[in-house]
Image (cartoon, grey):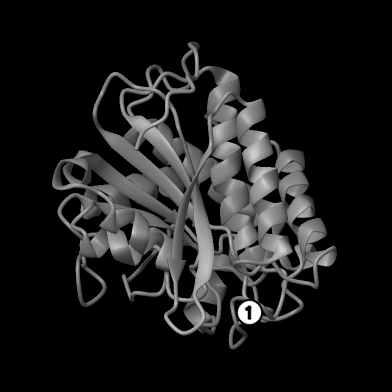
């Protein structure tokens, strides 16, 4: 499974998001031309790979409602089960948001493209989700979970969240599914997801640190909905400790990402080596949790959609 991800492809995705921001006022916030351009790029890439992306529209805000949308695309499967990989597509208004969260979008998109290219056959339906409304309160992922019936919720075997995975002063975090290092565990099954990520990283010589579910990203709706949840994170506004610097390198006493929610969160702010490693890790976890036959087996990615 190593070296499946092409760094040049990740760079190409980030360049598209940077161009979208540069051409439309410097950001990719919801209901802006920058968001629409980013969405169009994601949809174009998915269609070219054989998926049928669809927009899930919603609105939020009572006084001045914002019309927004998620993008969803599925692999086909004979199983009724669903594994969701998600990353938020919107940025803050203050900047282009290339680490937060162009990095996560690039990772999820690249996993989708590589699985299609390799003709991977998965037992579980794999759904790639690109959320709107995250920076204003996780509205897109919340709407998605709210729309699920009880049966559809039960069919979700896992949600993998990818939000900020190319931090320049990074620490490798995985969400603390079993609650062993934070105040609250995730829903039943979340501990197993954490172990999958930990094992993959450990095999690469990385001792990832647990990070608690603190209601600050799109995983929150899935946790509250009782869906097993996990994911990857490399740090944003927090400060790197001396112990973390000894383990991961970088600068102790400095933010994981000094450009978090700032105009300087450009493509130059993203640590491409870290993003590549996190994308490879996400790919390996998807192969494991999606029950992909023979690793990346040859077959056909289908275009079948789901509600």
Residue placed at 59% from the left, 64% from the top? 90
Q: Residue at x 25, y 24 (%)?
A: 79
Residue highlighted by disc 1: 261
Residue in the foreground of this view, choosing between 113 and 179: 113
Q: Quadrant of residue 246?
A: bottom right
Residue 270 at x, y = what percent?
71, 63
* Residue 135 against residue 109 in the figure, above or below: below
Residue 292 in the image: x percent, y percent? 38, 24
Please tell me whether residue 263 is drawn above or below residue 86 in the rendered image: below
Q: Quadrant of residue 74?
A: top left
Secondary element type, mark 1: loop
Relative placement, left or right, of 149 versus 132 is left
x then y, percent, for residue 263:
75, 79
Specify whether residue 234 is in view: no
In the image, 101 versus 30, the foreground residue is 30
Residue drawn at (27%, 58%), measured in percent from left and top?
Answer: 146
Left or right of 124: which side holds 227? left
Q: Residue furthest bottom?
A: 253
Check disc 1: other Cα within 10 Å, few if <14, some if 14-19, many if 20+. Answer: many
């Amino acid at each position: 499974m190593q070296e499946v991800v092409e760094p040049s492809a990740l760079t190409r995705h980030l360049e598209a998001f940077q161009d979208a921001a540069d051409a439309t006022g410097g950001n990719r916030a919801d209901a802006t031309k920058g968001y629409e351009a980013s969405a169009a790029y994601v949809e174009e890439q998915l269609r070219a790979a054989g998926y049928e992306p669809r927009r899930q529209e919603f609105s939020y805000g009572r006084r001045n409602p914002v019309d927004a949308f998620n993008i969803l695309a599925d692999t086909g499967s004979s199983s009724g089960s669903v594994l969701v990989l998600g990353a938020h597509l919107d940025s803050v208004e203050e900047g282009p948001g290339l680490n937060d969260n162009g990095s996560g979008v690039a990772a999820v998109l690249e996993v989708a493209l590589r699985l299609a290219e390799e003709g991977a056959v998965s037992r579980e339906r794999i759904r790639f989700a690109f959320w709107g409304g995250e920076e204003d309160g996780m509205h897109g992922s919340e709407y998605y979970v709210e729309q699920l019936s009880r049966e559809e919720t039960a069919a979700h075997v896992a949600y993998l969240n990818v939000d900020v995975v190319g931090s320049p002063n990074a620490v490798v975090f995985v969400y603390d599914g079993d609650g062993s290092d934070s105040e609250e565990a995730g829903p039943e099954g979340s501990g197993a997801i954490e172990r999958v990520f930990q094992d993959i990283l450990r095999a690469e010589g990385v001792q990832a640190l647990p990070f608690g579910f603190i209601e600050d990203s799109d995983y929150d709706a899935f946790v509250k909905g009782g869906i097993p949840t996990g994911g990857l994170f490399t740090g944003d506004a927090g400060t790197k400790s001396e112990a973390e610097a000894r383990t991961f390198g970088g600068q102790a006493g400095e933010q994981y990402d000094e450009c978090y929610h700032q105009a300087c969160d450009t493509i130059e702010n993203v640590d491409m080596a870290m993003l590549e490693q996190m994308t490879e890790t996400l790919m390996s976890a998807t192969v494991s949790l999606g029950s992909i036959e023979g690793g990346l087996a040859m077959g056909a990615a289908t275009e079948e959609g789901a509600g």
